[in-house]
Amino acid sequence: MELPELAARWMHALTSTAYIPLSRAEIEQALLESLRELPESPESVANRLVSLHATGPDSLSATIELLSPTFELPVLARLSSAYAQAMRMDAFDQQEQIKVAIVRAKQRVERTLKVSQARFQEVFASSALGIAITDFDGRCVEANDTLAEIVGLESGADLTGRQLIDFFHPEDRTALASSYRQVRAGHVDRFRDQRKLIREDDEPVWVHLAASLLRDADGEPTHHVTMVEDISELHLLQRNLDHQLLHDSLTGLSNRQHFATQVERRLDSQAVTLYHLGLDAFSVVNNGLGHDTGDKLLKIVANRLGRLAAEKNAVVARIGGDEFAMMTISDNVTSTVEEIQDALAEPTFVDDHGIALSASIGVVDRPPAFATAAELMRCANAALRQAKARGKRQWALHDPHDDARRRGKYALAASMPGAWEHGEIEIVYAPVHDLETREVLGAVARLHWDDLSHNDTMALADSTGLSLPIGRWLLREACAQAARWVEEFGDRAPTLHVALGALQSRDEDLVADVKRALDETGLPPERLRVALDISSVLAGDDNAAVLHDSGIVTALDGFHGGHDELAVLAEVPVRAVITRAPAPDPDSPLRQAMRDLIATVHSFGVRFGVDEVHTLTDAEHWRSIGADAVIGLLPALTAAEVTELLTTAPSPPPEAS
Amino acid sequence: MSEQVSWVPEGLDTGMPSAARLYDYLLGGGHNFAADRMLGEKFLRAQPNARTIARLNRAFLRRAVLFMMDNGIRQFLDLGSGIPTVGNVHEIAQKADPEARVVYVDFEEVAVAHSQLILEGDPRAEIVQEDMTKPDAVLKAARETGLLDFTQPVGVLTVGVFHFVPPEADPSAILAAYRDAVPRGSYLAFSQFTQDLQPEEMAGIVEVMKKSQNPMFPRTMSEVEGLFGGFELVEPGIVPLPLWRPEGTNTDDPDKAGIYAAVGRKV
């Protein structure tokens, strides 16, 4: 048989006795080379067979069977013995290798074990819990320092060999021993208990303890492990602190934070109703009868609300000085409000003082699910403010629309300082027209911000505390501008009218501010008219008089024609009053009354001006009953526009037409 | 604190036979101990063809790896790789392309230690010690080796191991997890014992293995089919070992092969 054919057949024979990880062609090639080599060196062929992994139990016999017709017996005998030797060496190598692997695996396991033990030791040593491992006779095999500290010993080692159970109160020992036996017998996995330890100095210590079984690698129980937590002193203090963080110390009710989390928790799953209570006239009690009485009263209220909350399965909290909150799972708002008022209305005696108790209540009923607790509490607060505004013992339901309006206003107020700083608030000038001559008497400096009118802007400024700085700024800027106009256009320059807000009108620095503005800008005093809010003179403020004495012409803004206002005109030297009122209809009886009023004003030597008159018809109505001047016939202009008008217009400046 | 001290892993006891070393023994390897060889003899009594089956299974592994290489796969995840024995995946793959990368996965201590010995000095092959029935842990460990790029197709190999996964371990969920971790164009090579071929012998094997650390769970053709969800079987589908893309003419009896083999492509 030709060698290649023999190699092919050998390949088939061998691959059915052993797995040789090569392609057939590769195996055949290797075997063909082996056949050529065989007569000379059967030993190297044997080695090659073994290294090819032709090492199945039947690989050798299949080889001999196939090769015996072609090769001499001595050659095959040498092949067989060399093959056996190579197999033996290969097996040794593999055994050696697997043993190394075993050793390595063991080392790794031992290393893991050491790490585990180190971790255990770390937990054992650093735990805030006392830990003792006891044998089944109850003797401590090991205990940590924390446990030693709890029982009043120096270190964990001092416990070794001692009976753990001896540290417990004698009355507790029998029950404890029984519990340990239950665990040992496997009736229960562990037991937890609260017992009294007796320290070395005979002081009792309350502890929580938990005991369970330790088992060996085979799962056989070997020891008990007991964890001991000291629940006296520090621990109690800690718990107390936790309580204080969530509760109001005076009344013991939940505090605002705690209440908010409770609302948050309920809000997702249930429709709730929130009641925000403000005690009526609590400050009267506090100021009149003293804070001790006030505190006692708050405790009484807390008690009553607590009782009511318990009945209604509601949550109650003290969320501010004299403010309480209650959350119910949605119920009948009216009847709950009644119940609250009834609870408060029970006769109340504090330190022999009979006190009538009532509350104003803001209610948010069934808020949308997406609301947050903070939003809800804000809404309830807003409703409470409304209720308070209506008087005592009132309640108000939160109106989302109203709230949106207020919020819009507040948001605007909040953005005002930034707007001012960024120059978004402008000064514009509205012409004042003389009704008789139709001449422009002057220009009123006004604030302009977004679409807000001067008065709205001033009111907003008042609510943010900005009105004083803005008012001063307005005064100074307008004076500076007017001075420039005087310098440039001489007599054609408009007289400057400045209307002050209520706060600024009463400001004790007003006179100084006005003088400084005039000094610094060089505006002649006769070119300035200052309109004060009439409330300032009504309140007895003397700014108007002092300004007058300083040679500055003043007017009173916000005139309604009241008796007190007229009385003021007799005393305070003012040049004009300014009113805002609808033009009296020619057919209305009011017309005569208004005419008489204007005549009366005139009789004090005071002129009568009307603001916010936007049409010629209205202006004519006012003129016909004697009014002297109007503001609003032409839109207000910016300083630049006024300058341009003065530049282009031949004298005199434009009249209303 | 654990009530049971369980940090000594089982399976380090050389007196306990292991499936990995049994396989080595059946393949004619020497990486085994007396206990493994005793189990091997019992196995051979139940299934006299066991050595051939082991050889055929190993040969299927080689053909499957080379098939995947032909289809562009250059990275392999070999699940339940066992004792490195004749013709390991990295040897086959790196012979075809030295850049090929392999991550072996096995849980058994000795197999892992042994694999580390074999793989020392090969920067493109590594073994991670994880339980292949816990895909999340396996995939995390495999990623941490830095050898596999899961944006590129991966050759996932589970050759002769799924018969150790009991039905309650939800084998199809396990394979689905591996499937979801690899991109389209990845392959899965799969082989496992079946009772469809030689049911009596198979029952004997199950009985023998029942008392070992690695009891066996043969699966029928349709059960195996059910495991290939999301994969498209490549020709010739699920077949007895020697019929899966044989090299040259097959001379082994498919009816005595004991094991089904298949390769699927993730679509």
Image: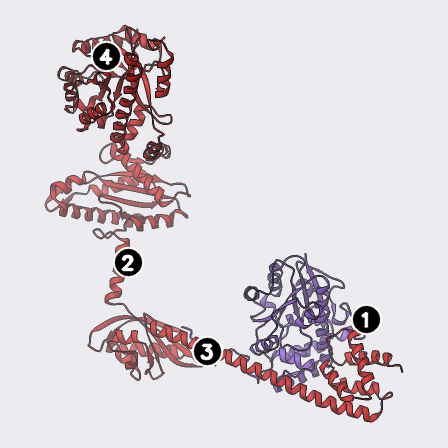
Q: Which residue is mark 4?
A: A608
Compared to A471, does A655 lie above or below? above
Q: Which residue is mark 2?
A: A242
Depth order, front residue of A182/B26: B26
In whole angstroms, how far apart are the C-alphas of marks 3 and 1?
Answer: 52 Å
Q: Quadrant of the C terminus of chain B?
A: bottom right
Q: What residue is disc 1 on?
A: B248
Would you say the residues marked 3 and 1 are in contact, meaning their CB atoms lie under 8 Å apart?
no
Q: Earlier in the sequence, mark 3 or mark 4?
A: 3
The subunit letter for the residue under badge 4 reads A
| Image spot of residue A579 (x, y percent) | 25, 16
Task: Report the disc number at residue A113.
Answer: 3
* Same chain, labels 4 and 1: no
User: Label 1 marks which chain's residue?
Assistant: B
Secondary element at image label 3: helix
Q: Residue at x 48, y 80 (%)?
A: A110
3D distance between C-alphas at marks 3 and 4: 101 Å
Which tag is nearer the camera, tag 2 or tag 1? Answer: 1
Task: Identify the chain drawn in purple.
Answer: B
The x and y percentages for residue A596 are 21, 8
Shade of chain A as shown in the rendered figure: red
